Amino acid sequence: MNKNITEFFFPRHCPICDRVLGRDEEICDDCKTIPRPVPPPHCKKCGKHVSEPGSDYCYDCLRTPRAFDRGFSLYEYVSIHDSISLFKNLGRPDYGEYYGKMMGRTFYGELTSLEADALIPIPLSEKRFRERGYNQSAILANEISQITKIPVYEDFLLRAHPTKVQKHLSRSERQNNMKKAFHIPQNDVKLKTVILVDDIYTTGSTVGAAAAALKGVGINRVYFITLATGRGY
């Protein structure tokens, strides 16, 4: 279907206020400053803001071993939490088109310099995918791929079993919840360096478990990029 016809019948909406956008708009002028980029300095492991003067790492990464090599996050979660909730839980996959493009544009240099073989979205369980109808991380990954030309491998990493929603769990509960949560069904594609893609980074339990599974099958380097992150300490 012609793009102009598609946008006539299915107009794009601002990912912040949900107003119908004009032809060349990606976000409302009034909403452009609402998503707040993660301020520097950034943790050299997970990408969160580092509040401790002179430290290269956030408090979490100083005390917690990480299976991933490094991460990048675009926005502070508190600035777009309502938008993310609509994006992933209330049927607004179109928001991911804008957010994925912004992730790719903002981190183009960092992502392409990694010489990654693949972008791997964090997978959903079959049950959650049926309920939602889409994987928000895959939408972000495909938009990033359009800009960076790094291919997306959606079925390389799968959920081994359903997990509880992480949002209301404590740090230790999150870690236990994600133990052995992922598996690689077949490893006939040999990847050396990959970038995980997810919507939110908080304690690192999800991307950490995914990274551990990937390194367990011989992948050398695992990075990640997320749309938003919690506050660093």
Image (cartoon, grey):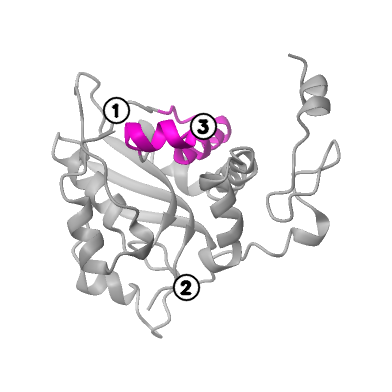
Q: Are marks 3 and 1 in contact (CB under 8 Å)?
A: no
- Which of the two residues, 79 or 218, is positioned nearer the viewer here? 79
- Which of the two residues, 174 or 198, is positioned nearer the viewer here? 174
Look at discs 3 and 2 and give the one toward the viewer. 3
Q: Quadrant of the N terminus?
A: top right
Say what secondary structure mark 3 lies in: helix
In this figure, which residue is indicated by the disc labeled 3?
142
Say what secondary structure mark 1 lies in: loop
At label 1, the amino acid type is Phe
Residue 69 is at least partly visible in this image: no
Q: Residue at x 43, y 81 (%)?
A: 51
Where residue 217 appears, as percent x and y from the top left, is 14, 34
Number of labels in the image equals 3
Labelled disc at residue 156? 1
Picture layout, residue 138 above or below residue 188: below
Picture layout, residue 135 above or below residue 103: above
Please tell me which of labels 3 and 2 falls first in the chain: 2
For residue 149: magenta? Answer: yes
Q: Is residue 232 left or right of residue 26?
A: left
Magenta residues, as a range? 123-152
Labelled disc at residue 41? 2
Farthest residue, direction right? 22
At label 2, the amino acid type is Pro
Q: Quadrant of residue 96?
A: top right
Q: Are marks 1 and 2 in contact (CB under 8 Å)?
A: no
For residue 124: magenta? Answer: yes
Residue 63 is at least partly visible in this image: yes
Say what secondary structure mark 2 lies in: loop
- Which of the two residues, 38 or 159, is positioned nearer the viewer here? 159
Where residue 201 appears, as percent x and y from the top left, is 40, 58
